[in-house]
Image: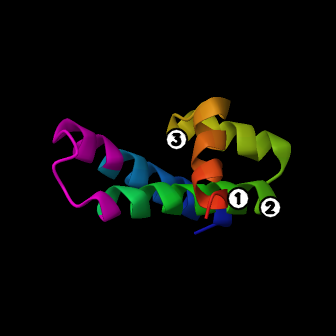
Amino acid sequence: MSVYEQLQRRIVDDVQALQILKKRRWLVWPMERVVKEEDIGRCCYLAEEWLGPTELQVLKERVGLNDKQWKRYKARLAAQ
């Protein structure tokens, strides 16, 4: 499995998990949500480091994140 495929799979899994948590109206441990958001942020940083601009844009589109969301996840990780 390529780096691109691994990052895509991990981001998609985490975004889906966050959507499920949101449907539950966040009635879960807050740390679970924080951990997922931080993991997405790490994947965003890794993607920018390992992928070219074209691959990066395609990845963002495939995982369903716009630039604002992408930066928000990175900022969550950087805030620590």
Name the quadrant containing residue 59: top right
Instruction: Give the Cα separation between the discs numbered 1 and 2.
Output: 6 Å
- Residue at disc 3, secondary structure: helix
**Residue at 51% across, 34% down:** 64
Task: Give the magenta-colored segment's residue range.
Answer: 18-31
Residue at numbered disc 2: 49
The reply to whether the C-beta atoms of the residues labelled 1 and 2 are less than 8 Å apart is yes
Classify 10 Å Cα crowding around label 1: few (below 14), some (14-19), many (20 and above).
Answer: some
Name the quadrant containing residue 47: bottom right
Residues 46 and 53: in front is 46
Classify 10 Å Cα crowding around label 2: few (below 14), some (14-19), many (20 and above).
Answer: few
| Residue 22, percent from left and from top | 26, 40
Q: Is residue 40 at least partly visible in the picture?
A: yes
- Residue at disc 2, secondary structure: helix
- The kind of residue on which mark 3 rests is Val
Residue at numbered disc 1: 45
> Per the image, is 25 magenta?
yes
Q: Is residue 4 at least partly visible in the picture?
A: no
Q: Count the marks.
A: 3
Disc sitting over residue 63 in the figure: 3
